[in-house]
Image: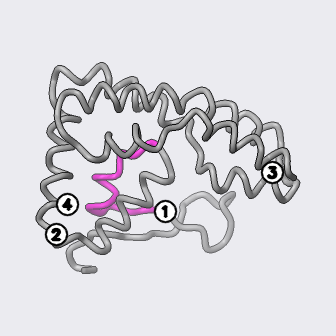
């Protein structure tokens, strides 16, 4: 795997990142990772570390790529990327609130999540109309208006 350069970690050139800090070097993962969120980057790394052998999953991912690359969807994709870049991991965010380690930055992240979430769901719904993809169906299917209310209830408990 090392010879294939699928992953390559190199020491970070900036000393302000601390001793032992690293970043992704020139690798296949580094070239393919255009993800806008930490969660997306982690998913891509997981998929590349342990690729699926299930034909149905591979076909599903290829269908999703076709939808994402279709010229008539580029305006929706651009909007989706713009909104995704503000999304932080809700689980990590909740941990900050539960641990009383929240800052103004965390409140801003929460606001951006609450603002962007319904927009992302709407975009995924429209993309799902242009072709079958369980990725879009999953995003749309998990959205419930109560989700945001539940998030605030969790924060209120702290």
SS for dot 3: helix
Q: Earlier in the sequence, mark 4 or mark 3?
A: 4
Crowd band around label 1 with a 10 angstrom C-alpha radius: few (<14), some (14–19), many (20+): few
The answer for how far apart the CA atoms under marks 2 and 1 are is 31 Å
Q: What is the x, y in percent for residue 157? A: 85, 51
Q: Nearer the viewer, residue 96 or 55?
A: 55
- Name the residue: 45% across, 42% down: 36
Residue linked to disc 3: 97
**Secondary structure category for the residue under label 1:** strand
Q: Is residue 51 above or below residue 73?
A: below
Residue 33 is a magenta residue = yes
Q: Are marks 2 and 4 in contact (CB under 8 Å)?
A: yes
Asked if labels 3 and 1 touch by Cβ distance under 8 angstroms, the answer is no
Q: Is residue 106 left or right of residue 84?
A: right
Q: Which residue is mark 2?
A: 54
Q: Circle 4: is it few (<14), some (14-19), or many (20+) Cα within 10 Å?
A: few
Q: Is residue 8 left or right of residue 54?
A: right
The residue at the point 20 percent across, 74 percent down is 4
- The magenta segment is 24-36
Q: Nearer the viewer, mark 1 or mark 3?
A: 3
Q: Earlier in the sequence, mark 1 or mark 3?
A: 1
Q: Residue 67 in magenta? A: no
Image coords of residue 71 (percent x, y): 16, 23
Using the numbered discs, state the Cα–Cα distance from disc 4 to disc 1 in whole angstroms: 30 Å
* Mark with earlier residue (4, 1): 1
- The mark closer to the camera, 2 or 1, is 2
Q: Which mark is residue 57?
A: 4
Distance from Cα at disc 1 to Cα at disc 3: 28 Å
**Residue 152 position by quadrant:** top right
Image-quadrant location for residue 67: top left
Dot 2 or dot 1, earlier in sequence = 1
The residue lying at 28 percent from left, 52 percent from top is 32
């Amino acid at each position: 795997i090392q010879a294939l350069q699928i992953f390559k970690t190199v020491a970070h050139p900036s000393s302000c990142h601390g001793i032992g800090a690293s970043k992704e070097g020139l690798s296949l993962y580094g070239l393919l990772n255009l993800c806008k969120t930490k969660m997306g980057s982690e998913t891509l790394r997981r998929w590349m570390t342990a690729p699926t052998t299930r034909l149905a999953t591979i076909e599903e991912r290829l269908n999703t790529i076709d939808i994402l690359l279709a010229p008539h969807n580029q305006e929706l994709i651009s909007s989706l990327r713009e909104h995704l870049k503000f999304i932080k991991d809700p689980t990590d965010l909740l941990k900050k609130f539960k641990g009383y380690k929240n800052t103004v930055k965390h409140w801003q992240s929460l606001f951006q999540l609450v603002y962007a979430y319904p927009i992302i769901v709407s975009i995924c719904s429209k993309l799902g109309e242009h072709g079958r993809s369980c990725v879009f169906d999953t995003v749309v299917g998990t959205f419930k208006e109560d989700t945001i209310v539940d998030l605030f209830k969790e924060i209120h408990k702290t």
